[in-house]
Amino acid sequence: MTPSALAVTAAGIDFQNPVLLAAGTAAYGRELASVIRLDALGGLITKAVSVERRHGAPSPRVAEFEGGMINAVGLANPGVEEVRADHLPWLAKNLRAAKVLVNVVGSRTEEFATVISMLDDSPGVAGYELNVSCPNVAAGGMEFGADSASLTDVVRRARAATKKPVFIKLSPTLQDIAKSAQTAADAGADGISVVNTMPGLDIDVETRKPALGFGTGGVSGPGLLPVGVLATHKVSQAVRLPVIGVGGISRATDIVQYVIAGASLIAVGTAAMQQPRLAEKLVDDLENWCQKHGVGSLTELRGSLAWEN
Protein backbone atom coordinates (compact mmCIF):
# COMPACT_ATOMS: atom_id res chain seq x y z
CA MET A 1 0.00 0.00 0.00
CA THR A 2 1.44 3.34 -1.02
CA PRO A 3 1.03 6.44 1.17
CA SER A 4 -1.20 7.90 -1.56
CA ALA A 5 -3.72 5.16 -0.78
CA LEU A 6 -4.48 7.08 2.41
CA ALA A 7 -5.12 10.27 0.44
CA VAL A 8 -8.56 11.81 0.79
CA THR A 9 -10.29 14.56 -1.15
CA ALA A 10 -13.02 16.15 0.95
CA ALA A 11 -14.98 19.29 0.06
CA GLY A 12 -12.50 19.94 -2.72
CA ILE A 13 -9.47 19.86 -0.40
CA ASP A 14 -6.76 17.26 -1.03
CA PHE A 15 -5.51 15.70 2.21
CA GLN A 16 -2.50 13.36 2.12
CA ASN A 17 -4.16 11.23 4.81
CA PRO A 18 -7.35 11.46 6.90
CA VAL A 19 -5.70 12.23 10.27
CA LEU A 20 -6.28 15.75 11.57
CA LEU A 21 -5.63 17.35 14.94
CA ALA A 22 -8.92 18.45 16.50
CA ALA A 23 -9.75 22.04 17.37
CA GLY A 24 -8.66 23.13 20.81
CA THR A 25 -6.01 20.43 21.17
CA ALA A 26 -3.35 21.69 18.78
CA ALA A 27 -3.59 25.43 19.54
CA TYR A 28 -2.35 27.09 16.32
CA GLY A 29 0.27 24.47 15.51
CA ARG A 30 3.37 26.26 16.71
CA GLU A 31 3.07 24.81 20.20
CA LEU A 32 3.40 21.25 18.84
CA ALA A 33 5.97 21.80 16.11
CA SER A 34 8.89 20.73 18.32
CA VAL A 35 7.34 17.37 19.27
CA ILE A 36 5.49 16.21 16.14
CA ARG A 37 5.99 16.44 12.38
CA LEU A 38 2.86 18.38 11.56
CA ASP A 39 3.46 17.86 7.86
CA ALA A 40 3.10 14.10 8.35
CA LEU A 41 -0.59 14.63 9.11
CA GLY A 42 -3.53 15.29 6.87
CA GLY A 43 -3.96 18.61 8.61
CA LEU A 44 -4.91 20.45 11.74
CA ILE A 45 -7.94 22.36 12.90
CA THR A 46 -6.91 25.45 14.80
CA LYS A 47 -7.98 26.53 18.22
CA ALA A 48 -11.17 28.60 18.14
CA VAL A 49 -11.06 32.11 16.69
CA SER A 50 -13.59 34.77 17.70
CA VAL A 51 -13.99 38.42 16.73
CA GLU A 52 -12.65 39.69 20.04
CA ARG A 53 -10.15 38.18 22.44
CA ARG A 54 -11.70 35.75 24.91
CA HIS A 55 -10.09 35.19 28.28
CA GLY A 56 -12.04 31.99 28.81
CA ALA A 57 -13.20 30.14 31.89
CA PRO A 58 -11.60 30.32 35.35
CA SER A 59 -9.01 27.72 36.33
CA PRO A 60 -8.77 24.84 36.75
CA ARG A 61 -9.88 24.30 33.17
CA VAL A 62 -9.06 20.63 32.70
CA ALA A 63 -9.53 17.56 34.88
CA GLU A 64 -8.92 13.89 34.13
CA PHE A 65 -11.10 11.06 35.34
CA GLU A 66 -11.03 7.32 34.74
CA GLY A 67 -11.97 6.92 31.12
CA GLY A 68 -11.49 10.44 29.87
CA MET A 69 -11.16 14.14 30.44
CA ILE A 70 -13.47 17.03 31.19
CA ASN A 71 -12.64 20.61 30.25
CA ALA A 72 -14.07 24.09 30.39
CA VAL A 73 -11.63 26.34 28.57
CA GLY A 74 -14.32 28.81 27.58
CA LEU A 75 -13.07 29.13 23.98
CA ALA A 76 -10.17 31.28 25.15
CA ASN A 77 -8.32 32.78 22.18
CA PRO A 78 -6.41 35.94 21.24
CA GLY A 79 -9.03 37.20 18.80
CA VAL A 80 -9.11 37.36 15.02
CA GLU A 81 -6.66 40.24 14.62
CA GLU A 82 -3.81 38.45 16.39
CA VAL A 83 -4.56 35.16 14.70
CA ARG A 84 -4.44 36.89 11.32
CA ALA A 85 -1.26 38.81 12.08
CA ASP A 86 0.75 36.12 13.86
CA HIS A 87 -0.55 32.56 13.92
CA LEU A 88 -1.77 32.01 10.37
CA PRO A 89 1.40 33.44 8.77
CA TRP A 90 3.44 31.01 10.89
CA LEU A 91 1.33 28.08 9.71
CA ALA A 92 1.59 29.18 6.06
CA LYS A 93 5.38 29.41 6.37
CA ASN A 94 5.94 26.12 8.18
CA LEU A 95 3.40 23.71 6.71
CA ARG A 96 3.81 22.33 3.21
CA ALA A 97 1.61 19.25 3.08
CA ALA A 98 -0.77 19.42 6.05
CA LYS A 99 -3.91 21.45 5.45
CA VAL A 100 -5.25 24.08 7.85
CA LEU A 101 -8.90 24.45 8.80
CA VAL A 102 -9.69 27.43 11.04
CA ASN A 103 -12.20 26.79 13.82
CA VAL A 104 -14.58 29.74 14.14
CA VAL A 105 -16.85 30.69 17.05
CA GLY A 106 -19.28 33.51 17.68
CA SER A 107 -21.83 34.82 20.14
CA ARG A 108 -24.18 36.07 17.42
CA THR A 109 -25.00 34.70 13.98
CA GLU A 110 -23.14 37.45 12.14
CA GLU A 111 -19.87 36.97 14.04
CA PHE A 112 -18.93 33.74 12.28
CA ALA A 113 -18.99 35.49 8.90
CA THR A 114 -17.10 38.45 10.34
CA VAL A 115 -14.21 36.23 11.43
CA ILE A 116 -14.17 34.45 8.08
CA SER A 117 -14.15 37.74 6.17
CA MET A 118 -11.18 38.96 8.19
CA LEU A 119 -9.20 35.75 7.61
CA ASP A 120 -10.20 34.74 4.11
CA ASP A 121 -7.22 36.28 2.32
CA SER A 122 -4.74 34.81 4.80
CA PRO A 123 -2.24 32.43 3.19
CA GLY A 124 -2.47 28.75 3.97
CA VAL A 125 -6.12 28.59 5.05
CA ALA A 126 -7.81 25.68 3.27
CA GLY A 127 -11.23 26.06 4.90
CA TYR A 128 -13.21 26.63 8.07
CA GLU A 129 -14.90 24.63 10.81
CA LEU A 130 -17.79 26.45 12.50
CA ASN A 131 -18.43 25.54 16.12
CA VAL A 132 -22.20 25.95 16.31
CA SER A 133 -22.33 24.30 19.73
CA CYS A 134 -21.69 27.65 21.40
CA PRO A 135 -24.62 29.73 22.73
CA ASN A 136 -26.41 32.37 20.68
CA VAL A 137 -26.72 35.33 23.07
CA ALA A 138 -29.42 36.86 20.89
CA ALA A 139 -31.57 33.75 21.30
CA GLY A 140 -31.43 33.31 25.05
CA GLY A 141 -28.26 31.20 25.01
CA MET A 142 -29.63 28.38 22.85
CA GLU A 143 -26.95 26.60 20.81
CA PHE A 144 -26.83 27.77 17.20
CA GLY A 145 -26.94 24.16 16.07
CA ALA A 146 -30.07 23.42 18.08
CA ASP A 147 -32.18 26.06 16.32
CA SER A 148 -32.73 25.53 12.60
CA ALA A 149 -33.28 29.24 11.88
CA SER A 150 -30.08 30.28 13.67
CA LEU A 151 -28.09 27.45 12.10
CA THR A 152 -29.34 28.37 8.64
CA ASP A 153 -28.45 32.02 9.21
CA VAL A 154 -24.93 31.17 10.44
CA VAL A 155 -24.20 28.91 7.50
CA ARG A 156 -25.65 31.22 4.86
CA ARG A 157 -23.68 34.18 6.16
CA ALA A 158 -20.51 32.11 6.30
CA ARG A 159 -21.13 30.76 2.80
CA ALA A 160 -21.49 34.31 1.48
CA ALA A 161 -18.22 35.36 3.14
CA THR A 162 -15.96 32.79 1.48
CA LYS A 163 -15.53 30.48 -1.47
CA LYS A 164 -13.50 28.10 0.68
CA PRO A 165 -15.10 24.98 2.18
CA VAL A 166 -17.08 25.36 5.38
CA PHE A 167 -17.54 22.44 7.80
CA ILE A 168 -20.19 22.65 10.52
CA LYS A 169 -19.33 21.07 13.89
CA LEU A 170 -22.38 19.65 15.67
CA SER A 171 -23.04 18.69 19.27
CA PRO A 172 -23.85 15.08 20.27
CA THR A 173 -26.69 16.38 22.43
CA LEU A 174 -28.79 17.57 19.48
CA GLN A 175 -32.25 16.05 19.43
CA ASP A 176 -31.86 15.02 15.78
CA ILE A 177 -28.26 15.39 14.61
CA ALA A 178 -29.07 14.10 11.13
CA LYS A 179 -31.74 16.77 10.72
CA SER A 180 -29.32 19.48 11.87
CA ALA A 181 -26.78 18.21 9.35
CA GLN A 182 -29.42 18.41 6.62
CA THR A 183 -30.27 21.96 7.67
CA ALA A 184 -26.60 22.91 7.41
CA ALA A 185 -26.29 21.22 4.02
CA ASP A 186 -29.37 23.01 2.68
CA ALA A 187 -27.89 26.33 3.81
CA GLY A 188 -24.67 25.74 1.89
CA ALA A 189 -22.30 23.79 4.16
CA ASP A 190 -19.56 21.79 2.44
CA GLY A 191 -19.02 19.27 5.24
CA ILE A 192 -20.03 18.23 8.75
CA SER A 193 -17.88 17.57 11.85
CA VAL A 194 -19.23 15.25 14.54
CA VAL A 195 -19.06 15.33 17.44
CA ASN A 196 -18.26 18.02 19.94
CA THR A 197 -17.85 17.13 23.63
CA MET A 198 -20.65 15.88 25.88
CA PRO A 199 -21.65 18.05 28.86
CA GLY A 200 -20.67 16.66 32.23
CA LEU A 201 -19.83 17.37 35.86
CA ASP A 202 -16.85 16.00 37.79
CA ILE A 203 -16.95 16.50 41.58
CA ASP A 204 -14.04 16.57 44.01
CA VAL A 205 -15.48 14.45 46.81
CA GLU A 206 -13.09 15.88 49.40
CA THR A 207 -14.11 19.51 48.84
CA ARG A 208 -17.59 18.65 47.47
CA LYS A 209 -16.92 21.19 44.74
CA PRO A 210 -16.68 20.83 40.97
CA ALA A 211 -13.25 19.83 39.72
CA LEU A 212 -13.41 22.64 37.17
CA GLY A 213 -13.41 26.33 37.93
CA PHE A 214 -16.43 26.88 35.68
CA GLY A 215 -18.30 23.99 37.25
CA THR A 216 -19.55 21.91 34.33
CA GLY A 217 -17.51 21.08 31.26
CA GLY A 218 -17.20 19.06 28.10
CA VAL A 219 -16.45 15.35 28.41
CA SER A 220 -14.05 13.78 25.92
CA GLY A 221 -11.85 10.71 25.62
CA PRO A 222 -12.38 7.00 24.88
CA GLY A 223 -15.99 6.93 26.10
CA LEU A 224 -16.98 9.35 23.34
CA LEU A 225 -15.93 6.95 20.57
CA PRO A 226 -19.24 5.09 20.06
CA VAL A 227 -21.14 8.38 20.34
CA GLY A 228 -19.07 9.92 17.56
CA VAL A 229 -19.23 6.80 15.40
CA LEU A 230 -23.04 6.67 15.65
CA ALA A 231 -23.34 10.37 14.85
CA THR A 232 -21.05 9.89 11.86
CA HIS A 233 -23.23 7.07 10.57
CA LYS A 234 -26.44 9.06 11.03
CA VAL A 235 -25.03 12.16 9.34
CA SER A 236 -23.43 10.29 6.44
CA GLN A 237 -26.79 8.61 5.77
CA ALA A 238 -28.61 11.94 5.85
CA VAL A 239 -26.38 14.17 3.71
CA ARG A 240 -24.02 13.73 0.79
CA LEU A 241 -21.26 15.75 2.36
CA PRO A 242 -17.87 14.69 3.70
CA VAL A 243 -17.86 14.02 7.44
CA ILE A 244 -15.04 14.63 9.91
CA GLY A 245 -15.39 12.06 12.68
CA VAL A 246 -14.30 13.32 16.09
CA GLY A 247 -14.35 11.73 19.53
CA GLY A 248 -12.47 9.05 21.43
CA ILE A 249 -9.85 8.19 18.81
CA SER A 250 -6.63 6.68 20.14
CA ARG A 251 -5.96 3.69 17.83
CA ALA A 252 -5.92 2.97 14.11
CA THR A 253 -8.93 0.69 14.53
CA ASP A 254 -10.86 3.65 15.93
CA ILE A 255 -10.19 5.48 12.69
CA VAL A 256 -11.33 2.44 10.74
CA GLN A 257 -14.60 2.43 12.71
CA TYR A 258 -15.25 6.04 11.75
CA VAL A 259 -14.46 5.41 8.08
CA ILE A 260 -16.74 2.36 7.97
CA ALA A 261 -19.46 4.53 9.52
CA GLY A 262 -19.01 7.05 6.70
CA ALA A 263 -16.27 9.50 7.71
CA SER A 264 -13.89 10.90 5.12
CA LEU A 265 -11.59 12.43 7.73
CA ILE A 266 -11.05 12.06 11.46
CA ALA A 267 -9.73 14.42 14.11
CA VAL A 268 -7.74 13.35 17.16
CA GLY A 269 -8.21 15.37 20.33
CA THR A 270 -7.84 14.23 23.92
CA ALA A 271 -5.51 11.31 23.15
CA ALA A 272 -3.16 13.63 21.27
CA MET A 273 -3.01 15.93 24.29
CA GLN A 274 -2.01 12.98 26.45
CA GLN A 275 0.40 11.60 23.84
CA PRO A 276 1.58 14.48 21.60
CA ARG A 277 3.17 12.16 19.01
CA LEU A 278 0.12 9.92 18.75
CA ALA A 279 -1.42 11.49 15.63
CA GLU A 280 1.74 10.90 13.60
CA LYS A 281 1.87 7.30 14.82
CA LEU A 282 -1.76 6.79 13.85
CA VAL A 283 -0.94 7.56 10.22
CA ASP A 284 1.62 4.75 10.16
CA ASP A 285 -0.64 2.40 12.12
CA LEU A 286 -3.55 3.04 9.74
CA GLU A 287 -1.37 2.31 6.73
CA ASN A 288 -0.18 -0.93 8.35
CA TRP A 289 -3.75 -1.97 9.19
CA CYS A 290 -4.83 -1.42 5.61
CA GLN A 291 -1.89 -3.42 4.28
CA LYS A 292 -2.62 -6.28 6.67
CA HIS A 293 -6.29 -6.37 5.65
CA GLY A 294 -5.73 -5.95 1.92
CA VAL A 295 -7.33 -2.53 1.77
CA GLY A 296 -5.91 -0.62 -1.19
CA SER A 297 -7.77 2.64 -0.54
CA LEU A 298 -9.90 4.10 2.22
CA THR A 299 -12.71 4.54 -0.28
CA GLU A 300 -13.16 0.75 -0.10
CA LEU A 301 -14.05 1.10 3.57
CA ARG A 302 -16.01 4.32 3.64
CA GLY A 303 -19.66 3.82 4.48
CA SER A 304 -19.37 0.01 4.33
CA LEU A 305 -21.18 -0.69 7.59
CA ALA A 306 -23.13 -3.93 7.26
CA TRP A 307 -26.17 -4.29 9.49
CA GLU A 308 -27.31 -7.83 10.28
CA ASN A 309 -30.92 -8.63 9.45
Image: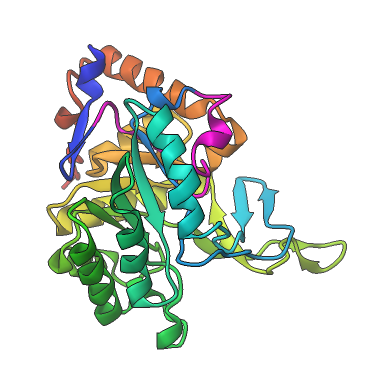
User: For residue 22: magenta?
Assistant: yes
Region in magenta: 15-36
Q: In this view, does 213 lie to the left or right of 250?
A: right
Tell me what residue is drawn at x 27 percent, y 13 percent. Answer: 291
Give how far across and how far down residue 241 sits, in percent.
16, 51
Q: Is residue 204 left or right of residue 283?
A: right
Q: Which image quadrant for residue 239? A: bottom left
Q: Which quarter of the image is occupied by the N terminus?
A: top left
Q: In this view, does 113 lie to the left or right of 227?
A: left
Tell me what residue is drawn at x 35 percent, y 54 percent. Answer: 119
Give how far across and how far down residue 87 sits, in percent.
48, 44
- Most prominent secondary structure in the magenta stretch? loop
User: Taking the image as drawn, is residue 156 in sight?
Assistant: yes
Give how far across and how far down residue 88 sits, in percent.
42, 43
Tell me what residue is drawn at x 45 percent, y 66 percent. Answer: 51
User: Taking the image as drawn, is residue 179 in sight?
Assistant: no
- Which one is in front, 168 or 289? 168
